[in-house]
Structure formats: C-alpha cells, structure tokens
C-alpha cells in the first residue's frame, strides 16, 4: 500500500495542509508542539479509520473554533483508492470514492497501518488490557475473520454482564445467553492464539536484530479461561471446558455481578531472557521490544498481503539510544513499508538515505 497524498483541514492544529510523502521514508521535523504528531495522527485516522490515541469524542480531534475537521488520503491499493474521514461534533464519517463506508473494520484491515508512539511502552510495562489491545490491533489487520469475531464476543459479553447486573438474576435467561457467549469466546480465543503463534518467532528475530542476544525476547498467548493450548485444542473441547467453568462459577458471578472467565481476561506474555519483561526490562529495552513487535507486524502483514503497510513512528529517536536507532533504521530499510518518522532534529537520527524531510511549524509544512 502507498499513500500518495494526504490533505488535512481542521484537525487539531492543522489547517489546509497537504503532504505528498516519499514512497519509502518521510521525516517530519520540528519543535515540540508544532504539529508533527498531529500529522501522524491524521495519517493514521485516514488509513486505520480510527484515532491513533484513544479519545472520548471525535470532536476532540477538531481544531479549536471549528465545527468540523477533514482528512483525505489518496492511496494505491490494487489501484487508486480515495478515503475521506470527516470529523463532526456528533462523530466521524468515512467515505471511499465518495460512498459511505459500512464495514469500517474490514476496510481498515485492507488498508493496513502499524504505528509506534511513546505510550506504546504499556504493551510491555502496562496491564493485560494494554497488551490485549496491542494484540487485537495486529489481529484485526492480519486475520480477516477477527473483526467479526471480536464484535460478536463483545456483544455476547455485554449481554451476559447485563443479566448478571440485574437485582435478581434470571437463571433461565442466563442459561440461554451463556452458549452464544461460549461460542464467541472460543472463536475469539482461537484467533488471538493464531495471531500470537504467527507473531512470536518473527518478533524474536526482530528483537534480536534491534538488541542482539541481550534482549532474548519471546512472546506467548495467555488465555483467560483455558488451560490447554488454545491453538491446537479442538473447538468442541474448549467450548465444553468453558461451559463447565461458567456453570461452576455461577454463584460467584452473581455476587460479583460480572462474567469472571473468558477472553476479556487474556494476556500476552512478553519475556526477556526467559523472565517477564514487564518488570525486568529497562525503559529503553521496553521500547525496543515494542518496536520489535511493530516491525514483526510489518513483516507478517507484508507477507500476508503481498504489499507493505504504512509504518508511523513518533519520536522514535528520542526513545532509543543512537546504536539502537541505527539498527532500527537499518531494519526499516529491509521492510517493504512506507515509513513516517517524527523528530525534533535530524541530528538525533543516524544518517538517512533517500527520503523526504518536511518541516512542521505552527501547524504548517515547510519543504
């Protein structure tokens, strides 16, 4: 996939900005607070059809004093593809070729974008929810069935929890809603396990390329409900196991008023030299591990699609020592991805090859 042009108007501090990026590497340079990360966010929004960082309302992305914002991207993906995201006070609307997008998750999966921001270190040092979200973002892009499976599970979990929160739980209704929950839980767990199985060896190789033997990184899926290997155990056996656990734990769930077993409790275990990286890895090592996860995702998505995704790296030079930053740029050059990097100055980066360097000042671009 290639982004030929992005037009941004009324998005955070950006007003009527047009960027025509380099096909391989575009470096956005400028002082902090000038709009570099905002431009990355705009690119992510039009490529992934969701914000780069969580927001409560789409209106938070609209420039101060404006009613609406607009991001328009011209892509090459098996032919020309024009995508537009309009931000309004009531939400956001996406169109492709002027037609409303009905299945946002499927289109986002087709487009493909991998991003790194400093807060992504929570994938290593944060809680299980941070790692689940990181895994799910990868699975959305890699596995076509994941979006529908995730939606189905979220709906089943919400319905079951709603019943458990009633002042008096209707056991007959709970009996009726539990089998659909079990089916959805098994489907989601198997897809997450598949994503991890495919991610793990490539992640270990990328971590070695970035940090050498010192990182010795591994990745594994930790189920929130199954003791057996989810990837190799038959679905029927997993369904039976989960149903039995839910039956045994029903009284406790009634007291807690929540579903206490299922993929909503999954975790991803990232280890360094055989020990959990969450507490063992230094800040620099944690960020190198996250970058290895991202580069592994780029490689796998490229293999699966036959073309690379966009790779967005925010202030990556400020997160790594110069040696690891040099290794990162070398590794990026080996991947088939269109890369966007933000930095406060090219002196913070190792020598750059063929690329475009674009200045960002007060929400405007300088070639």
Image (spheres, rainbow, N blue to C red):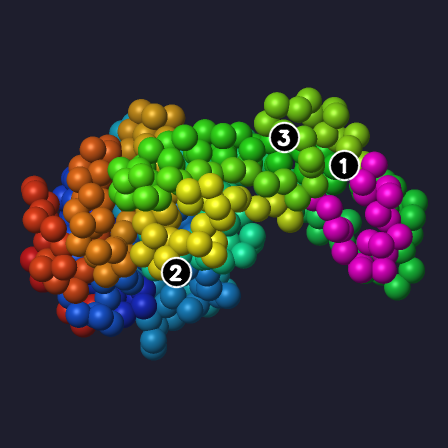
Secondary structure at numbered mark 2 = helix
Front-most of residues 158 and 269: 269
Q: Residue at x 17, y 47 (%)?
A: 326
Q: Which residue is mark 1?
A: 242
Q: Which residue is mark 3?
A: 230
Q: Is residue 158 above or below residue 108?
A: below
Regarding residue 89, the answer to whether it shows in the image is yes
Horizontally, residue 268 falls left or right of residue 186, namely left
Q: Which residue is mark 2?
A: 119
Instruction: Give the percent coordinates (x, y) of residue 204.
Output: 38, 35
Q: CA distance from mark 3 to mark 1?
A: 12 Å
Mark 1 neighbour density, 10 Å: few (under 14) some (14–19) many (20 or more): many
Residue range in magenta is 244-262
Q: Is residue 91 above or below residue 182?
A: below
Q: Where the N terminus falls, by quadrant? A: top left
Instruction: Give the percent coordinates (x, y) of residue 351.
Output: 8, 49
Q: How many marks?
A: 3
Q: Is residue 199 above or below residue 247?
A: above
């Amino acid at each position: 996939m290639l982004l030929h042009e992005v037009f941004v108007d009324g998005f955070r501090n950006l007003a009527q900005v047009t960027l025509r990026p380099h096909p391989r590497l575009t470096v956005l340079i400028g002082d902090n607070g000038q709009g570099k990360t905002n431009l990355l966010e705009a690119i992510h929004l039009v490529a992934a059809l969701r914000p780069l960082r969580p927001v409560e309302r789409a209106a938070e992305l609209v420039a101060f004093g404006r009613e609406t914002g607009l991001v328009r991207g011209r892509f090459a993906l098996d032919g020309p593809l024009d995508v537009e995201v309009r931000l309004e006070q009531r939400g956001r609307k996406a169109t492709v070729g002027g037609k409303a997008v009905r299945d946002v998750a499927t289109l986002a999966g087709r487009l493909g974008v991998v991003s790194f921001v400093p807060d992504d270190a929570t994938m290593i040092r944060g809680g299980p929810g941070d790692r689940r979200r990181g895994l799910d973002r990868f699975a959305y892009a890699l596995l076509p069935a994941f979006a529908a499976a995730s939606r189905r599970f979220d709906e089943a979990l919400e319905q079951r929890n709603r019943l458990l929160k009633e002042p008096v739980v209707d056991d007959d209704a709970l009996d009726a809603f539990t089998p659909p929950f079990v089916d959805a839980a098994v489907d989601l767990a198997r897809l997450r396990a598949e994503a991890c199985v495919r991610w793990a060896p490539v992640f270990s190789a990328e971590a070695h390329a970035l940090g050498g033997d010192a990182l010795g990184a591994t990745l594994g899926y930790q189920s929130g409900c199954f003791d057996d290997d989810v990837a190799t155990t038959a679905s029927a056996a997993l369904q039976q196991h989960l149903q039995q656990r839910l039956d045994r734990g029903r009284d406790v769930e009634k007291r807690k008023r929540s579903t206490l077993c299922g993929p909503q409790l999954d975790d991803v275990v990232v280890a360094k030299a055989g020990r959990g990286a969450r507490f063992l890895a230094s800040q620099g090592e944690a960020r190198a591990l996250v970058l290895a996860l991202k580069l592994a995702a780029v490689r796998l998505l490229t293999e699966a699609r036959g073309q690379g995704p966009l790779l967005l790296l925010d202030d990556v030079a400020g997160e790594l020592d110069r040696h690891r930053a040099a290794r990162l740029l070398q590794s990026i050059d080996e991947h088939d991805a269109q890369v966007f990097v933000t930095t406060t100055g090219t002196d913070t980066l190792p020598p750059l090859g063929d690329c475009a360097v674009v200045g960002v000042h007060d929400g405007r671009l300088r070639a």
